[in-house]
Image (cartoon, rainbow, N blue to C red):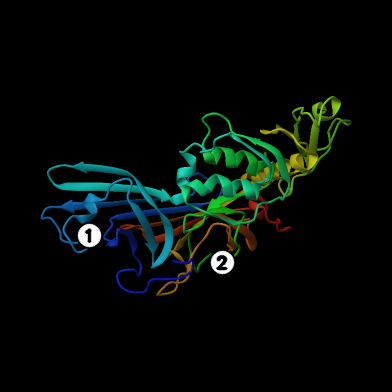
Amino acid sequence: MANGDQRTRFPYLNRAVVVIDGSEYFEWETVAVRLAKREVPANTFRFTCSEQEPIGTSWSGRTGDAMRIIPGQKCQVYLDGYLAIDGEVVTRRAHYDAQQHVVEIQGQGRAGRLAEASVPHKTGEFNNINFQQLAQKIVQPFGIGVTGKAGSDQQFKRVSLQPGESAWELLERYARASNTVLGETNTGQLELGTAGGGGSAIEGVNILIGQETIHSLKAVGSGEPEAGGGEGSDFKSMGQAPGSDDAWGADPTHQRQSEQGGITSDFSSGFLPKINLSEIPAWSNDQMLNRAKMESGFADSLQIWVTVTLLSWQHSAQAPPSGGLWKPGEMVTVNSPMLVMYGRSLILKAVTFTQDDSSGTRSTLELVNPAALGGEPEAK
């Protein structure tokens, strides 16, 4: 089912539905579905259900069917009829006493396995490969594909697997060196970068709760040494390349480094340089620049973090809700006079969809500066 397509027949409207082997389960007591960038696993879900005395006949039309969902079963999670996660059940927790029987089901998207499995490769090495190609080779044995585009086309002369590291750990190391943000699509594919789209969060219209954190200790990018002398305030990445038959002597052993000024310096407190050592061999200065950009983007996410809780799971909170589900990577304009970020466009890092009998149906958006996910910051 493609992203944006909606199942419109009952019981999908305003419901979370888990489809396992063709059976549909939808009478959940609590629902929590999280989609995120730069997290592992990226797409997760948690549902609870219970049987009370007298035993009901809900679940999927057959008494207690949902009580028999077990880890390892493949499933699709739909919210308001839209596919949110294509993945599998990974955890089942059960509790019972004299009054009730409660079961909690947890799961993840198909790409979640990359964080638990080692890389299946005979030689443990790839040569002359860029990150897009590397990602495709790593995920192919898991039956998933790659969408989006890496942040850089630069080639790595040699990619070496570390003993015992997971597929995700390997991808993460080289994603940092190519300035590439990792995520997962709703169909379980590894997603590079962001796919665009957007919406608005407006105080008095669809914002129920608004929270804002602005932090200055990561705001690198302005200020010279206050005592005079030395270098300016930048992110610096450095490292060395290994020697080989083609590169030996001083060339590979000379330190390679590159600097990247803080992309956003709105909240800088002054001189605050940052230095990090490359996690992989420093094949070129361009690679070090990408690593510095990645660190600068991460610092941007720590400078600005706005969390808004909205009514409904879709972009529009009108009745019935419409516009499709919120998706990480979308641009969101926050219009809230009570927040400093009033009128500022931020990027959606993560969204958590919830539903229960006390709070109703909600979406909680975690918004950061666009540069945090590879975009351009808004100058305000």
The amino acid type found where label 2 is placed reads: Ser
Count of marks, rendered view: 2
- In-front residue for pair 219/285: 285
**As displayed, is residue 128 above or below residue 229?**
below
Residue flagged by tag 1: what amino acid is it? Trp
Residue at screen point 29% across, 51% down: 48
Secondary structure at numbered mark 2: strand
Residue sticking out furthest to the top? 249
Label 2 Cα crowd, 10 Å radius (few <14 / some 14-19 / many 20+): some
- Tell me where residue 366 appears, x and y as whole percent: 53, 53
Residue 59's disc number = 1
Q: In the figure, residue 246 lies in which quadrant?
A: top right
Q: Comparing marks 2 and 1, which lies closer to the viewer?
A: 1
Quadrant location of the C terminus? bottom right
Q: Position of residue 28 (x, y in %)?
A: 28, 57
**Near-viewer residue (378 or 330):** 330
Secondary structure of the residue carrying tag 1 is loop
Q: Nearer the viewer, residue 67 or 318?
A: 67
Q: Earlier in the sequence, mark 2 or mark 1?
A: 1
Residue at x 80% of width, y 33% of height:
256
In the rendered image, the residue lying farthest to the right is: 229
Whether residue 344 sits left or right of residue 311 in the image: it is: right
Looking at the rendered image, the quarter that the N terminus falls into is bottom left
Spatial CA span between label 2 and label 1: 35 Å
User: Is residue 25 visible in the rendered structure shown here?
Assistant: no
Q: Nearer the viewer, residue 346 or 169?
A: 169
Q: Is residue 205 visible?
A: yes
Residue 16 percent coordinates (x, y): 35, 61
The residue carrying mark 2 is 200
Residue occupying the point 25% across, 47% down: 103
Residue at 11% x, 53% y: name it.
Answer: 53
